[in-house]
Image (cartoon, rainbow, N blue to C red):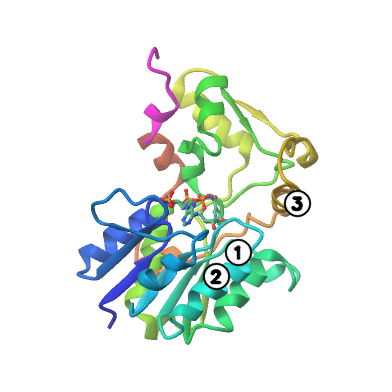
């Protein structure tokens, strides 16, 4: 039974849901943020290792959201070494087990698996919530009526961040049950970008155009590492690497995973401009 947990990325799509659910379950949560808002969050900054000890020392479990940084394998290793006895639930990505051993995503998983006394790996597909995130597709869908993703027409097994969080919380609360497991986490069906755009169009009453650029055309202005990671990601998407479905959400939470239709139905205002 765990009593205390560190949640990294506690303002992020999955982290905030994990923190809320753990607190509801009576766990003392250290909610980590690089810019804590002063209420119920603590400072945890991947760029400042002096914040790691206070955040991670003494907790029974860690929800570990890897940073999308070149140095993530070393950063994650450093955090686990602060408290190698804690049960670590790592947010990785679908297909991490299929890439080369020296691939960044594999090296992040290895950093945990080889150091933490107890771990569970979560390998989610693409989140529904990137459609409502300004860092990803929100602005283009709302303002330009375009959904542009170099998928090559391959479907993605879109999954809801809240379902990922529920699986994460189950793994955090019951380490004995989930220790040493790796769960691919997906929604109930694999859906193409063209279909997502069509579903958005019919709900919003105006066309959302699906675009399918070549991966190389999406890298302008990015640093070489980020461009390389995206290139690899898009090629895996195009090869169907994010299309396989997993029963994990149903098996672990007891309910069906949230469908993309439900997500679209309940977030329509996000893609409407104030004048609409
Ligand atoms: N998005 C997807 O579809 C998808 C699919 C599979 C896997 N993943 C993986 O899931 C993870 C989350 O992805 P996301 O992009 O969607 O992020 P997100 O959930 O929106 O969260 C980003 C988080 O990073 C935190 N952060 C930013 N700078 C930080 C720093 N210097 N130190 C500590 N925390 C910092 C932010 O919180 P503060 O600003 O409060 O620090 C925020 O909570 C990533 O590892 C990603 O590779 C994502």
Q: What residue is shown at x 36% (from left), y 62% (from top)?
A: 166
Q: Pick the residue in front: 100 or 248.
A: 100
Along the horizontal axis of the image, is 105 left or right of 125?
right
The answer to whether the residue bearing label 2 lies less than 8 angstroms from the nearest atom of ligand 1 is no
Q: In the displayed image of the protein, which residue is found farthest to the front? A: 50
- Residue where numbered disc 3 is placed: 228
- Residue 134 vertical placement versus 65 (above, below): above
Do the residues under discs 1 and 2 have CB atoms within 8 angstroms? yes
- N-terminal of the pair, mark 3 or mark 1, is 1
- Residue where numbered disc 1 is placed: 72
Q: Is the magenta stretch mostly helix, strand or loop?
A: loop
The answer to whether the residue bearing label 1 lies less than 8 angstroms from the nearest atom of ligand 1 is yes
Along the horizontal axis of the image, is 22 left or right of 209?
left
- Residue 11 vertical placement versus 148 (above, below): below
Q: Pick the residue in front: 107 or 146.
A: 107
Residue 4's quadrant in the figure? bottom left
Q: What residue is shown at x 37% (from left), y 27% (from top)?
A: 269
Residue 55's quadrant in the figure? bottom left
The residue stretch that appears in magenta: 267-276
- N-terminal of the pair, mark 2 or mark 3, is 2
- Residue where numbered disc 2 is placed: 76
User: Of helix, strand and loop, which one carries label 1?
Assistant: helix
Along the horizontal axis of the image, is 52 left or right of 195?
left
Do the residues under discs 2 and 3 have CB atoms within 8 angstroms? no
Along the horizontal axis of the image, is 83 left or right of 225?
left
Residue 82's spot in the image, x, y percent?
A: 46, 79
């Amino acid at each position: 039974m765990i009593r205390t947990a560190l949640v990294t990325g506690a303002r992020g799509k999955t982290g905030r849901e994990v923190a809320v659910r753990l607190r509801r379950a009576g766990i003392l949560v250290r909610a980590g943020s690089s810019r804590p808002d002063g209420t119920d969050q603590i400072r945890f900054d991947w760029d400042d290792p002096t914040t790691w000890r206070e955040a991670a020392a003494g907790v029974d479990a860690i929800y570990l959201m890897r940073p999308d940084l070149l140095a993530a394998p070393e950063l994650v290793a450093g955090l686990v070494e602060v408290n190698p006895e804690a049960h670590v639930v790592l947010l990785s990505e679908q297909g991490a087990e299929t890439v080369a051993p020296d691939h960044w995503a594999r090296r992040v998983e290895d950093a945990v698996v080889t150091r933490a006394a107890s771990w569970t790996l979560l390998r989610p597909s693409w989140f529904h919530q990137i459609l409502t995130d300004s860092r990803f597709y929100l602005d283009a869908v709302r303002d330009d009526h375009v959904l542009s993703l170099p998928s090559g027409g391959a479907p993605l097994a879109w999954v809801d961040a809240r379902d990922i969080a529920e699986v994460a919380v189950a793994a955090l609360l019951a380490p004995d049950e989930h220790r040493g497991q790796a769960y691919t986490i997906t929604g109930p069906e694999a859906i193409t970008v063209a279909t997502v755009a069509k579903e958005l169009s019919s709900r919003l009453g105006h066309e959302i155009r699906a675009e399918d650029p070549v991966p190389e055309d999406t890298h302008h202005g990015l640093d070489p590492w980020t461009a390389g990671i995206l290139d690899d990601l898009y090629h895996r998407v195009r090869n169907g690497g994010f299309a396989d479905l997993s029963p994990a959400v149903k098996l672990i939470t007891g309910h069906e995973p949230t469908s993309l239709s439900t997500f679209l139905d309940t977030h329509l205002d996000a893609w409407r401009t104030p004048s609409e």
